[in-house]
Image (tube, rainbow, N blue to C red):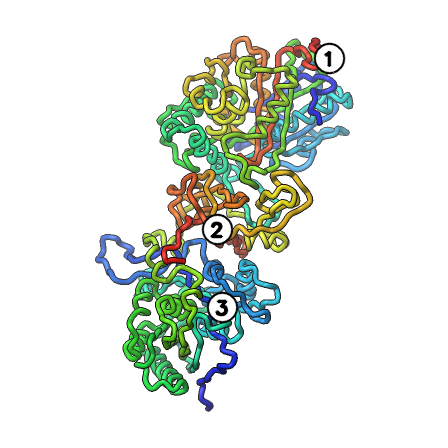
Amino acid sequence: MADSSEVLDHTTPPGIAAYAAYLPAYVLDDNRLDPDGPARPGRSRSVAAYDEDPVTMAVEAARGLDREPAADGHLFLATTLAPYDAKTSATVVHEALGLAPGIGSIDLRGHRAGATVVDLACRTRSVGAAADVRTTRSGAPDELAQGDAAVAFVGGDPRAAAPLVRATRTVEMLERWRLPGEVHDRIWDERFTAELLVGAATEAVAEALTAAQVDAVDAVDVVVVSSSNARAATALRKRLGGDGADATVEAQTGFTGAAHPGLLLADALDRAEPGQLLLLVSATDGADVTLFRVGDGVREARGAATVADQLARRQRIGYGRFLRWRGLLDVQGPARPASAAPAAPPMHRRRSWKYRLEGVRCDACGSVTTPPGPACASCGSLDGGKPVSLRDREARVVSVTQDRLTTMPEAEVALVVADVDGGGRLTAYATDVVAADVAVGHRMRPTFRRLWTTDAIHNYFWKLRPWEEDTDGE
Amino acid sequence: MASRRMAHDVAIVGMGCTPFRDHWNSSADDLLVQAVRECVGAVPELDLADVDAFWVGTQGSGMSGQTLSRPLRLVGKPVTRVENYCATGSEAFRNAAYAVSSGAYDVVMATGVEKLKDSSFSGLTAVFPPADGTDVDWTAPASFSLLAPAYQRAHGIDDRELRATLTAIAVKNHANGALNERAQFRSAVTAEAVEKSPRIAGPLGVMDCSGVSDGAAAAIIVRAEDAYRYTDKPVFLRGMGFVSGSGAGLANDEYDFTTFPEVVEAARVAYEQAGVVDPASEISLAEVHDCFTPTELVLMEDLGFSSRGQGWKDVLDGRYALDGALPVNTDGGLKSFGHPIGATGLRMMFECYTQLRGEAGERQVADATLAVAQNLGGQPGSCVAFVAVLGNELGPDPRTGRGAA
């Protein structure tokens, strides 16, 4: 058997050119069915809103990246809960990001894809996104130890980090699995699988360090460990002598599946100094190890708020609401029909609006019409105009209401009409906000969401969420 | 560019209107037949066979002219089905009026029907063509409730003042409906009952919403010069405007949700045709589209009954009550009479017709000479709007200043 380690060719050093993490707006820190029962403080998990899935979260992560993939690159989407089977989910992300049609779209699945996607993005100068939404049965011992997150990278110049060496171990084992259509993982006794995972990771780390001519793990500045097996993660962190930052993030998010290695890497890059050695260890279904040198442009390479900032601005969610969002509690809604499923041809014809939120700016009068149509809503000109992206603009609420007959898993949902800075009007659902708190004059920003799923068709479009000033000097 | 009074004036000589109810035991066919029989029965000089052409308005209770020709087993007659959101009933009337005015027919009938209660859903539902899925799935109360915060902000009124205004509208229309045996809800309600009703959209509770009901209505229209052959109390169409909005209110940033520009324009056209200069003083009564209480508030200003920003005060002052200076929705309105979509426009005309003939009993507005029927559909920012002025006399033609007929 050949050695699995690979010393990378430094004449064309592909690395991480840009990165961004996305944490949804909610945190669950109490999963007691009986609020009078004894509290079990300490853990919390990241919670995606009811209108998020790995596709929408991947879009939210990747939209802030300021680098394009290579012309022959790809978009990789890694998740263990793709919204579609058979249909490629990455194509939705591709469309929403407005990537060139010549960029490929590839779904990666399985826990291990979380490390693979970082590697592939670098190697092929591609966009690599990883996202997961994770659930357990109510009351499972690890219910607060599983969470939702997304992360995205663009491979290219090693502005953020250059991979110096990789090592891998594939070990077939039954650790976490589920059948198609299931949402909760089944788990084998974690003491058994921890032993296998720690063994595989230890071998791969040793191999990588040797190949990189690093004498001991002590010479590594930052160690990041991700594992689907919490016991293995704890053991490896102890053995490799990390500073505990990875465990600190994980205690607030839970294990975020395919997003996890990338999320912890992003958090480490948020704080790493140029020139440092960073060891990323992902132990799941074997082990993947990469030793990076942090790049000189690591600060500029960040395309979203830091992981720490995103953790700090989350809002708590109650357990009942969490269960309802995940479909784990069947709540009687109003006597209203399901919202209509979108149809394939109109979705395709109007993809620039549906996926990229592009209105049209009239050639004759310069005003913006939304949704785009053949005639200008202001001057009536039928002579057309230019597409204008509204995705990253501020929108100000003109009027608002709260729908209490909503078929969404909420008691009420805010609906707003909002004017976009620079022109255009959006009529949209508000999200990540208490419905009653939205008021005329509030500033909002577009966010890509799954509006509803009817007749096995997911309906993706943009909603509006409260505008947040960047607090970390962007 | 012109929107003229018709070449020949027209008049309503007979009407029918079913009670608006949960008609569990009646189909749309049954309701149409009932309204048509009452309508024809009201004109002894006419048989159904004397009607030359028919219009039937329904939003979703039938397709094609056969919605009417099949239940009535009409033989050899033209029937046109029309649909224009919640202004569907008015649209049937409008097209029938043009047809008889043109001289193509001598006697026409406009009908409207909706059978809503065979659905088990709350509120209205509609089936739209396949689409890209980017539209908000509005409930009607949610879309109309956008008027409330915008009106408050524009005119500086607080939550309590707004609530009192909306409540007054609901209480008034229920009080009127309580006097009307054809209304869906025939009992007065207290302010407390309105304000404690379950909230369903923004500040709106169930009691801010019109009644979902079943019903049908019908009108026989002839040229004005023929009207007295059929009745000694015809009701004349004095002016009529209709606007199908561009939807720009939801597509660019110019509209502020404090008005229905479509209504303002339709009213301007109708008033001009009718020679109405000051609607606030000239109109005896009005039937308006109070689908939700804020709608009626805004309409008082759009129709020129109140000046901008003063509508809420006029409501609270009782100006639009049955004993007020300009009674509005004397039959209970959509709020209390109910809102079977395709029938509503003609139901409004039925009340105007009844009032102008002096046959409204306890609800009778003294010396009623000019009535407004205003009907709309869609949502604020993107709607269709109809306004008609009806009179118990043909009146002078504003084009010539001479009396016609």
- Per the rendering, the mark at residue B225 is 1
Which badge, 3 or 2, comes first in the chain's sequence? 3
- Could you give the CA–CA distance between mark 3 and mark 2, rounded to whole angstroms? 23 Å
Write down the chain letter for disc 2. A
Observer-nearest of B183 and A359: A359
Question: Mark 1 or 3, which is nearer the eye?
Answer: 3
Q: Please give the label number shown on residue A446.
A: 2
* Residue A299, x across and y down, in percent: 40, 65
Task: Give the residue at mark 3.
Answer: A154
Position in image of residue B271 (x %, y %): 61, 19
Front tag of 1 and 2: 2
**Residue A42 position (above or below residue B225):** below
Query: Tag 3: residue type?
Result: Val
What residue is at 70 percent from the left and 22 percent from the top? B4
* Among the 4 quarters of the image, the one containing residue A238: bottom left
Identify the element where label 1 is drawn.
helix
- Residue B181 in view: no
Which kind of residue does numbered mark 2 sit on? Answer: Pro
- Residue at 40% across, 51% down: A468
Q: Is residue B128 above or below residue B294?
A: below
Give the label, 3 or 2, closer to the camera: 3
Q: Is residue A237 visible?
A: yes
Residue lying at the far left of the rendered structure = A38
Q: Which quadrant holds the C terminus of chain A? A: bottom left
